[in-house]
Amino acid sequence: MTQATPFHPDVESALSALRATPPARVYFVACGGSLSIMYPAKFLLDQHAAIPSDLFNGAEFTARAPKGLGKDSLVILCSMTGTTKETLAAAEFARSRGARTVGLTTETGSPLGKACDHAIGFEAPYTTGVPIDAKNSNYARIYQLVMGLVALTEGTDYSQALMSSLAALQPAIDRAHTAFAPRFADFAPRFAKQEVIYTVASGASFGAAYSFAICVLMEMQWINSQAIHANEFFHGPFEVVDKDRAFILLKGCDSTRPLEDRADTFLHRFGAAENILVLDAASLDLTGIDPMFQGNLAPLIFFDTLWRFAYQVADLRQHEMLEGRRYMKKLSY
């Protein structure tokens, strides 16, 4: 495989080891916020390669013990700190079955990094508070790994388009913060008073909705929430819609956008516009991001900007974010 633009060295190292015998199946495994990046990663792989893949919560992966897991499998895992016990156990289980493993973590020398055949480092501002360039995020690293697998298994090289798009991502995020700021200032006072806020999305954006629901609204703000797939919305959840119910709808620009458009139409038909926060990728300035990858990178723009919105809500609720957690990382569970 020849690449017009090299990926991050950690990614290149993992791909080099896979080159002689590419995997026949891929498993994406993680928990919580790290699991959320697996949704768009699988979406990207499904778009460009015939290789089958599955997505699992770390503990269920080990408990379910997929019979297809073996020496021809690649298991891609992620844990921000590299210490998530379920993800670490999943890596050890995968290796016991002969599968090759790649672990994404901010600390390549962490337990997960050491438990995997290959460790890929990334940067994260959410735990350190230090701003980063989005091209160094977990999304960026896993997308490089996925497109490297596409090149290995399909013979098509999209590295140049991906890397140039990742280089343009942070400026696009910065512009989005400016574009969304008036909407956030408008919605924050109302949403700060809500006891329940639902998030809706599909396709590449579903992981961002999932992460915002469970890791931000529920974990950090103790606001009841549920991530609802935009089409599953019509198979039960839409019965809760009324003028008082609050929703965040992420409208991306991938092939599943019509599903989100349909949800948008229904929400505004039976809900109240002042309680429906719509973030629409079609309104963003995505200059420099290749059209091929705009739908895949929109979720990172959504989540990065929603993080700022969450802090506005937290300030109005006088409720701390990470510091206010009662249980996570504070006791044994």
Image: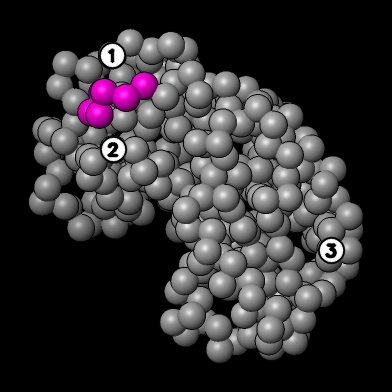
Q: Amino acid at mark 3?
A: Ala
Dot 1 or dot 3: first in sequence order is 1
Cα–Cα gap, marks 1 and 3: 49 Å
In this image, 269 relative to 166: left or right? right
- Residue at 12% x, 38% y is 70
Please give the range of residues in magenta: 152-157
Q: On residue 1, which mark appears?
A: 1
- Residue at 50% x, 36% y is 292
Can you say whether 102 is above or below 13 in the image? Answer: below
Which tag is nearer the camera, tag 1 or tag 3? 1
Q: Amino acid at mark 1?
A: Met
Q: Position of residue 41 (x, y in %)?
A: 42, 42
Position of the N terminus, as image quadrant, is top left
- Residue at 47% x, 71% y is 231
* Crowding near the residue tagged with mark 1, few <14, some 14–19, many ≥20 C-alpha atoms within 10 Å: few
Q: Which residue is mark 2?
A: 49
What SS does tag 2 mark?
A: loop
- Residue at 56% x, 89% y is 239
